[in-house]
Image (tube, rainbow, N blue to C red):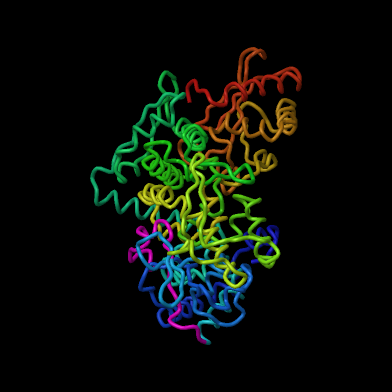
Amino acid sequence: SGKSSAAKEDDNKMSPSALTLRFIPLIECYLIVASSTLLVRPATALSPTDTSHSYSSASNKRKLDETPSTPVPVNAQQSSLISPVPIIRVASTSSTAGISNSGVITVVLPGTRFRQSAEYLQMQMEFAEINADAIRLLNFVEQNRVVLNMILRHNVQLLESSFSLLVTLPKCRQVLHFDIKRAYFKLKLKRKRLNAARSNSNMGGSLRITVHRQRVFEESFQALRYKTADEMRRKLSVTFAGEEGMDAGGLTREWYSVLAREIFNANYGLFITTGDGVTFQPNYRSYINTDHLAVFKFVGRIIGKAICDGHLLDAHFTRSFYKHILGLSVNFHDLEAIEPDYYKSLKHLLDTPLEYLGLDLTFTAETDNFGELKVIELVPNGKDIIVTDENKYEYVRLIAHNRMTTAITTQIDHFLEGFHDLVPPELISIFDAQELELLISGLPDIDLDDLRANTEYHGYKSTDLEICQFWSVLRSFSKEEIALFLQFVTGTSKVPLDGFQALHGSDGIKKFNIHKAGGSHQQLPTAHTCFNQLDLPEYPTEELLREKLLIAVREGSEGFGFA
């Protein structure tokens, strides 16, 4: 929307005025009429951002970030919001690119088979035609986005009825704030779980697993790989073999935390780090692990279950992978975060006449399979099609698509098979790639002021010297140490999406709480992660408090006594 985060926060704090409330019935009537007269359900499960481009027309000369300036069909308009010049049109069940008689390049997005249901199509509504009424609706939604969000923040259930247009029409749901989308998402998930429980008497009970801490990934995979989707929806209860901890929520949170790290363990060869050194995407060489596709399905289930259960994961993927989860097409610029040097070379190719580069290129790509070079045709007979200044834009789109999609299509498809066992594609599609990252991983920064404002004390008062020293020590910690501390007391190093006011314990919302511990000042602080509780002895000096707390968080952040 172009608004600053501070401005959005101001919007969030506002409540509907009496005048606004009086206009709600009129808004409802307008949206209901617009939905019934202007919208149609798409006949096929095209991605909301997919469209097609001529292979040899003058349109190939357009720059990759150029946006159409004249009215175009709705699919193309939608694509301009995420991928200004998309490269894909879903037209078959094959993942191989091809050129039709009309010169259109077509390929298939991974996971297309999961996006064929009536429920999914219902969430991808289109305008029957782009006319004055359609434009008037879009203008109304854009101009009143603050008021609409204000109303929905106080009654998100309107999205299931009179305001449904705002979530079923992709063009409109972009004005919805993330917290509203998340509330709607949770509401629909809860309804689905309750409906499944009513129709399936086997949904009761817990899903119990026991794993050794040193083999969390392997043993969890074996314990869960053959579970049905219904079994995976049960409440998870984790036991670490040889440890005394009883799971009231804290062990499960730590299991998620440890498992999230193991997913990216290079020894498994499932994911590789990208140019930024922080994000990950599937490894096209994952086949070195004979069970790699089953493991990708398992990883998809873990990510999906974490979302459904409200557990945050320290798992950050590339923007293109988030798009694949959402069924959105990737674009050339997504390649920059994955392979920045390769992106620069392709950008140079676009910006420079080929005659000055001395390159002899065809519509092919090379892959290196452990020293063995393999040539892949980007289109049928691609080895015979010379790259020219006229068609190099299509070449770059296809080469980027090959790197980010085609090379890892099988891995993505199996990940989505597991993911959609638990998270329906029609529900996850309401988010964009940035919002999906927030949904999975939570807020990235730990705000100590927010933590302090949402802390309860037992045996201490907020003004006691020991408490003042505690917060002084915590502020002296490095970012890593603060994350370790948070993991020590809550079982995870991630902050809830709504801040520490929404910190969960074993029985729902449970704020961070500090209890005065008896005994000698030689003792270490202890924690009860199921209750977000820190037992803090009285230390004679701030220096000793810092020393003991650091020992506790460094040596105890992944161990349990009784939780």
The quadrant of the picture occupied by the N terminus is bottom right
- Pick whichever, 115 or 155, lies toward us: 115
In the displayed structure, 81 sits above or below 556; it is below
Q: Residue at x 66, y 58 (%)?
A: 9
Residue 299, quarter of the rendered image: top left
Percent position of residue 532, x then y: 55, 33
Looking at the rendering, the stretch of residues picked out in magenta corresponds to: 107-131
* Residue 213, visible in the rendered structure: yes
- Pick whichever, 88 or 310, lies toward us: 88
Q: Residue at x 76, y 20 (%)?
A: 543
In the displayed structure, 469 sits above or below 446; it is above
In the displayed structure, 389 sits above or below 466; it is below
Percent position of residue 278, x then y: 61, 42
Is 116 magenta? The answer is yes
Residue 519, quarter of the rendered image: top right
* Residue 175, visible in the rendered structure: no
Percent position of residue 436, x then y: 52, 53
Percent position of residue 442, x then y: 56, 46
Q: Residue at x 70, y 61 (%)?
A: 4
Is residue 270 shown left or right of residue 356? left
Is residue 1 shown left or right of residue 299? right
In the displayed structure, 494 sits above or below 376; it is above
Give the farthest residue toward the bottom. Answer: 132
Main SS of the magenta part reads loop
